[in-house]
């Protein structure tokens, strides 16, 4: 069990430094598997003979199923026996299911099924994947709440998680851009995708094992029973009724959901593989130039994210979300203006390393990456905060239920991202094909690319600000909530001690 430290009379469950570094590796595991399925639209078109727009519809319907399974698996997580922990079994089982699905999608199943058989196979594989992703993700979602309840440590935990979420993709993307893609003439075909995803699976396994080691000390029967004890001293049974009560009665959970779900919806649409390749490959005409920009952005952005994590620890998730949303909006507006000034034919100037357009693009990419990292840190901190708020409201410690309720809406909204992206590129000519480097640049390609890449995220950031307007868990309120929770636990412990005496 993690040690407890006392700060101004308040006892906190504290994590060790190595745990704070290793446990968040689950974020690296998740992002690896997510990146594999970012290219599902390419696999559907190239490997299973499915029209691009139809692939988008399939992914959308599958993600709606994912939203439903999130709640069901969160329920199973709460009921799961704690003798060997909860997080570790779910992490490993989820990884196995995901790995099998990814291998089937890009390896064993590709180019062996066409027509109706290809359609059915693609759907089944994608459903298997989303079940595995959900099982894995529910464990990662509760780690911060299980490992520590120290408000000073939570932002740091989420900062390390952000490092994995952004650092791992950058490392993998460099390997793909400079080592794997050139082998296949810079084309995203099935042999290239198979080699890439096998590499991603291997890296995700390493991240999974590292995370399991990091959470092992806190993921035990003693901690879970203590955390799940109701203020009455009895362990609360969690059911669907409690899940609905959290959603319907906890206003802060509702605002947290709105903040994260709408923001992620906009960002997920903008970062669909077909949209990113539309901008990087078609408009800019250089995967390597945009990758170099992303490298600078991630390295410098992590420095800003570290400082921002310290700031969030002092000002709280509410103010942090508002401040950094305005910052991200400002950067998005600048980047949008640069694209409009350059125009459809001028955006290839960005692909010339060392040009003024390239340097300005790098600066904007640095700012946007830093902004998104900071918002990610704030969102992770907020999830743990609303878990404490729900314990204060109802007396129940239900981190996986909070994660499940959030995911129900998060994935319900983000489920339409793939459909929007594939439908959008269909409108500009990509009906049975997908964007590739060297394609013709048209005005439709230009406006669709920058609209989904910059305008849509601005709308998401504005939703963040709106949702935070009446969010109540600021720094002062959260401190009182945690003190009240601790006082109730201490009272229960004292009653039990007297009863035993």
Image: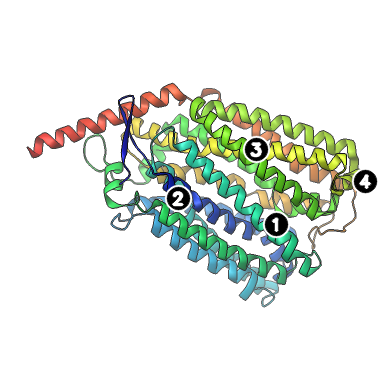
Q: Which residue is mark 2?
A: 23
Q: Secondary structure at mark 3?
A: helix
Specify which label sits upstream in the sequence, 2 or 3. 2
Residue at x 34% of width, y 48% of height: 218
Please say whether residue 482 is visible from this viewpoint: yes
254 relative to 264 in the view: left or right: left
Number of residues whose C-alpha sits closer than 10 Å to that of mark 2, classed few (under 14), some (14–19) or many (20 or more): many
220 relative to 51 in the view: left or right: left
Disc 2/disc 3 C-alpha distance (Å): 22 Å
Specify which label sits upstream in the sequence, 1 or 3. 1
Disc 4/disc 3 C-alpha distance (Å): 29 Å
- Numbered label attached to residue 345: 4
Specify which label sits upstream in the sequence, 4 or 3. 4
Disc 1/disc 3 C-alpha distance (Å): 19 Å
Q: Secondary structure at mark 2?
A: helix
In the image as oriented, which residue stretches furthest toward the left? 501
Number of residues whose C-alpha sits closer than 10 Å to that of mark 4, classed few (under 14), some (14–19) or many (20 or more): few
Q: Which residue is mark 1?
A: 174
Q: Are marks 1 and 4 in contact (CB under 8 Å)?
A: no
Disc 2/disc 4 C-alpha distance (Å): 46 Å
Specify which label sits upstream in the sequence, 1 or 4. 1
Residue at x 9% of width, y 39% of height: 500
Which residue is nearer to you in this view: 285 or 276? 285
Specify which label sits upstream in the sequence, 1 or 2. 2
- Numbered label attached to residue 370: 3
Specify which label sits upstream in the sequence, 2 or 4. 2
């Amino acid at each position: 069990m993690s040690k407890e430290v006392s700060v101004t009379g308040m006892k906190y469950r504290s994590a060790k430094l190595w745990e704070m570094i290793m446990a968040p590796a689950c974020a690296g595991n998740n992002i690896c598997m997510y990146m594999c399925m970012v290219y599902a639209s390419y696999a559907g078109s190239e490997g299973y003979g499915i029209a691009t727009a139809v692939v988008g519809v399939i992914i959308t319907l599958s993600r709606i199923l994912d939203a439903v399974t999130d709640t069901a698996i969160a329920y199973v997580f709460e009921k799961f026996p704690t003798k060997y922990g909860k997080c570790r079994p779910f992490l490993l089982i989820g990884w196995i299911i995901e790995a099998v699905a990814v291998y089937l999608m890009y390896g064993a199943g590709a180019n062996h099924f066409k027509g109706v058989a290809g359609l059915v196979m693609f759907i089944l594989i994608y459903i298997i994947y989303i079940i595995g992703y959900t099982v894995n993700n529910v464990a990662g979602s509760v780690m911060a709440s299980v490992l520590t309840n120290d408000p000073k440590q939570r932002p740091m935990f989420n900062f390390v998680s952000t490092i994995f979420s952004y650092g791992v993709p950058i490392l993998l993307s460099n390997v793909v851009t400079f080592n794997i893609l050139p082998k296949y003439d810079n084309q995203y075909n099935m042999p290239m995708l198979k080699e890439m995803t096998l590499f991603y699976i291997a890296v995700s396994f390493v991240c999974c094992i590292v995370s399991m080691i990091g959470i092992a000390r806190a993921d035990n029967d003693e901690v879970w029973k203590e955390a799940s004890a109701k203020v009455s001293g009895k362990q609360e049974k969690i059911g669907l009724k409690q899940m609905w009560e959290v959603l319907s009665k906890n206003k802060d959970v509702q605002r947290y959901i709105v903040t994260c779900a709408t923001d992620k919806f906009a960002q997920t649409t903008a970062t669909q593989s077909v949209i990113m390749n539309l901008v990087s490959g078609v408009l800019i005409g250089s995967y390597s130039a945009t990758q170099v920009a992303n490298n600078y952005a991630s390295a410098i952005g992590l420095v800003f994210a570290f400082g921002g994590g310290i700031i969030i620890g002092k000002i709280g998730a509410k103010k942090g979300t508002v401040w950094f949303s305005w910052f991200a909006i400002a950067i998005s507006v600048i980047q949008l203006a640069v694209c409009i000034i350059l125009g459809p034919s001028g955006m290839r100037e960005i692909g010339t390393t060392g040009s003024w357009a390239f340097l300005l693009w790098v600066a904007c990419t640095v700012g946007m990456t830093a902004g998104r990292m900071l918002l990610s840190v704030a969102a992770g901190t907020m999830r743990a905060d609303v878990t404490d708020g729900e314990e204060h409201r109802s007396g129940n410690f239900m981190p996986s239920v909070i994660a499940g309720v959030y995911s129900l809406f998060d994935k319900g909204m983000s489920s339409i991202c793939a459909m929007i992206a594939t439908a959008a590129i269909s409108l500009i000519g990509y009906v049975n094909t997908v964007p590739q480097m060297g394609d013709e640049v048209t005005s439709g390609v230009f406006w669709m690319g920058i609209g989904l890449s910059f305008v849509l995220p601005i709308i998401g950031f504005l939703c963040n600000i709106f949702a935070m307007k009446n969010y109540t868990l600021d720094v002062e309120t959260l401190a009182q909530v945690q003190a009240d929770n601790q006082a109730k636990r201490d009272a229960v412990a004292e009653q039990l001690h007297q009863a035993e005496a």
